[in-house]
Image (cartoon, rainbow, N blue to C red):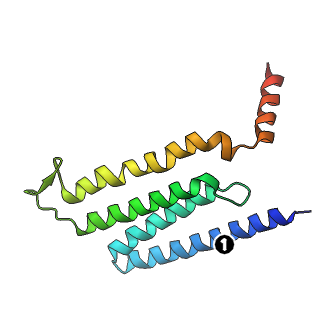
Amino acid sequence: MTTRTQQTADRGTDQLVGLLGVAFLMTGITMLAGMTMLFAWGMSLVLTLCLALGARRQGRLGPFKPWLIAALVVWLLAFALMHAASNDATRLMFGFTEATAAAVYLLWPAPFLLVTLPYAFLFDRHVLSDADWEAIEQFRDQKQ
C-alpha cells in the first residue's frame, strides 16, 4: 500500500517524464526544421530535466533546485552567445573567437561547477537518508 506522499512523488515524477518527452519531441522538430538556436535550447532543457529526474528524492529536488536552474540559465545564455557571436578570426577573446570563447568559458565549466560539485557536496544530506547510511554501515560491518 502506498502512502499519500509516495503517490504525490510518483505523480511529480510522471509529470517530469511527460515534460521530458515533450521536450524531446520539440527538440527533434526544431532539429529537423533547422532551427539551430531552438534546438540548442531544447537540448539544454532536456539535459536539465534528465538531471532533475535523477536528483529527485522523495518527490523533491531539495537543495539541487537552484543549482539546476542556474545551470539551465548558463547553458541558455552560452548557446545564445555562441549563436549571436562573430566567428571573425580577427576578433579574439582570450585567444578564441567569440563563439568558441563562449563555449570554452561558459558552456564547458557549467556542468562541473553547477551540477557535479553541488551533487558531491549535498550527496550525504539529500541523496542518502539516515536509514540508507545505517544500511551501508551494517553492510560494511558484516563484511569486516
Does residue 143 appear to the left or right of 19 in the view shown?
right
Q: On screen, 118 above or below 99?
A: above
Picture quarter with the N terminus: bottom right
Tag 1 secondary structure: helix
Q: On screen, 31 above or below 75?
A: below
Residue 58 rendering spot, x and y as whole percentages: 74, 56
Q: Residue at x 48, y 77 (%)?
A: 26
Which residue occupies the foreground of this view, 40 or 68? Answer: 68
Picture quarter with the C terminus: top right
Q: Residue at x 81, y 35 (%)?
A: 135
Q: Quadrant of residue 57?
A: bottom right
Which residue occupies the foreground of this view, 28 or 93? Answer: 93
Which residue occupies the foreground of this view, 123 or 42? Answer: 123
Q: Residue tagged by mark 1? A: 15
Q: Quadrant of residue 133?
A: top right
Does residue 65 appear to the left or right of 139 in the view shown?
left
Classify 10 Å Cα crowding around label 1: few (below 14), some (14-19), many (20 and above). Answer: few
